[in-house]
Every structure is written in C-alpha cells, then in structure tokens.
C-alpha cells in the first residue's frame, strides 16, 4: 500500500504528520506542493477518495464562488496553477484519505501487519 502525502513545509500540521509517520516507521512518498506542484491527474486521484469533492480539500478562504462557475477541469487547472489553495497535508492510500493532521484518524494508515506487531508487544 503506497501512501502519498501532499505537503507544504510552512505548515505545522504537515511537519506533525511527517514526524508521526516517521515515528511509526511507515514509509510514504512526500509531494511538496510548494516545490513540485500538483497535476490534474493527482487532483483527480485525491477527489475520487473524498466525500464532498473540492469542499473537502480546499482551504476555507478560497473564493468558491469563482470556482463554482467553472467546469471541473477549469477548476482543477486553477488549483494546479495555485496549489496553495489546498488544505495540507493531504494523505492518501489506495482507498483512504486524510486531510489535515488528526492523530486519532491518521492511525487508519498504520498497515495491518504493523498493527499486529504492536498488539503482540
């Protein structure tokens, strides 16, 4: 199960999430939005996992009225141009998504084999 974490290093929540995964010895691929950006393909991969689409991944201060008037592809292009519109961290695996850092929910990313080891100890 590959875990991807979309981050912005100026975010304390991102640093907490990275630290948590490191302490739990869980490997992940970090995508630094402020350096690498994001593609429409990656955004679609994220959106498939959300319950409420763009509302789940966009910061509150983003002008939603403007985005609501655009087609989905046009809205995604705006986000690609300005990935700072996204909440961070966004953590995804095959069928899970976590937006932001909340330790009680992030535990869902602990692999089953790793959980068995913790219980056995």
Image (cartoon, helix red, strand yellow):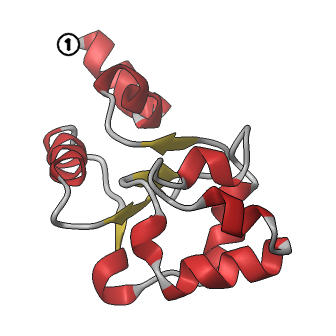
User: How far across and how far down the image is residue 95, in percent?
Assistant: 67, 44
Q: Nearer the viewer, residue 81 or 16?
A: 81
Q: Nearer the viewer, residue 33 or 115?
A: 33
Number of residues whose C-alpha sits closer than 10 Å to that of mark 1, classed few (under 14), some (14–19) or many (20 or more): few
User: How far across and how far down the image is residue 92, in percent?
Assistant: 53, 52
Position of residue 45 relative to residue 105, above or below, is below
Within the image, what quadrant is residue 47 found in? bottom right
Within the image, what quadrant is residue 40 found in? bottom right
Position of residue 15 relative to residue 52, above or below, is below
User: How far across and how far down the image is residue 115, in percent?
Assistant: 38, 23
Within the image, what quadrant is residue 96 found in? top right
Q: From the viewer's perspective, tell me whether residue 100 is left or right of residue 40.
A: left
Residue at position x 64%, y 70% in the image: 43
Pick the quarter of the image with the C terminus.
top left
Residue at position x 27%, y 19% in the image: 118
Q: From the viewer's perspective, tell me whether residue 46 is left or right of residue 13.
A: right
Q: From the viewer's perspective, tell me whether residue 39 is left or right of residue 50.
A: left
Q: Residue tagged by mark 1?
A: 121
Position of residue 51 relative to residue 58, above or below, is above
């Amino acid at each position: 199960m590959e875990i991807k974490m979309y981050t912005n290093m100026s975010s304390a929540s991102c640093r907490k999430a990275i630290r948590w995964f490191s302490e739990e010895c869980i490997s992940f691929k970090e995508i630094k939005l402020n350096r690498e950006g994001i593609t429409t393909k990656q955004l679609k991969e994220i959106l498939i996992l959300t319950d409420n689409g763009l509302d789940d991944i966009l910061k509150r201060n983003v002008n939603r009225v403007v985005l609501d008037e655009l087609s989905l592809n046009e809205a995604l292009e705006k986000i690609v141009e300005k990935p700072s519109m996204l909440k961070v961290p966004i953590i995804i695996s095959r069928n899970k998504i976590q937006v932001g850092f909340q330790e009680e929910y992030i535990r869902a990313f602990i692999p089953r084999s790793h959980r068995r080891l913790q219980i056995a100890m």
